[in-house]
Amino acid sequence: MPIIGTIRAGEPVQAVQNIEGYEVIERKYLTSGYEYFFLRVIGDSMDTVAPEGSLVLIRRQSDVDNGDIAVVIVNGHDATLKKVHRIGSCLTLSPMSTNPKHQLQIYDAKNTEIFIIGKAEKVLSSTDL
């Protein structure tokens, strides 16, 4: 699978897609009919599940269930990795961190351009690579 760049596990930052290389993944983590790619994690807002430097396997899909970890684009170009909850038009992005500085991010889709790129399926930590 291609490693197409980095994802911020913190405040959303501009999404840039560049293939950095490739990583092998077992077929058991892939579902037929979906596109997959890896992103490298920068930051510590998701350090309990995806430490900085780890690779996250993303299944491209435009919606996720409440409680899923997903790549979310905010304001059309700012990407972040967070646990997602949706209530009506509001999307709450929750950090999963040991660092108390990270707070919930709450967006109203009526006022903010926000959409889901894909669901995190598997995390490969630096010790797995």
Image (cartoon, rainbow, N blue to C red):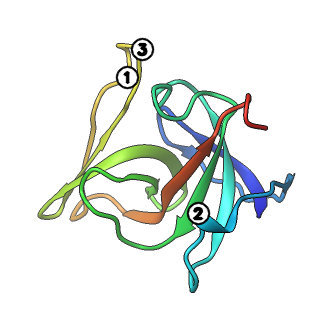
Q: Name the side, left or right, on which 96 lies relative to 17.
A: left
Q: Nearer the viewer, mark 2 or mark 3?
A: 2
Image quadrant holding the N terminus, namely: bottom right
Q: Which residue is mark 3?
A: 99
- Real-space CA distance between mark 1 and mark 2, rounded to the nearest whole angstrom: 30 Å
Please tell me whether residue 61 is drawn above or below residue 100 in the rendered image: below
Give, as a three-letter code, the residue at label 1: His
Q: Nearer the viewer, mark 1 or mark 2?
A: 2
Give, as a three-letter code, the residue at label 3: Asn
Residue plotted at (66% across, 34% down)? 125
**Most distant residue in the left direction:** 88
Image quadrant holding the C terminus, namely: top right
Residue plotted at (60% across, 70% down)? 30
Mark 2 lies on a secondary structure that is helix
**Most distant residue in the right direction:** 21
Instruction: Characterize the local packing of mark 2: few (<14), some (14-19) or many (20 or more) Cα atoms within 10 angstroms.
Output: few
Earlier residue among tags 1 and 2:
2
* Residue 39, numbered label: none
Displayed quadrant of residue 108: bottom left
* Rendered location of residue 103, percent (x, y): 31, 26
* Residue 102, numbered label: 1
* Rendered location of residue 93, percent (x, y): 32, 44
Earlier residue among tags 2 and 3:
2
Residue plotted at (28% across, 62% down)? 65
Please tell me whether residue 117 is drawn above or below residue 125 in the rendered image: below
Q: Which residue is mark 2?
A: 29
Give, as a three-letter code, the residue at label 2: Tyr
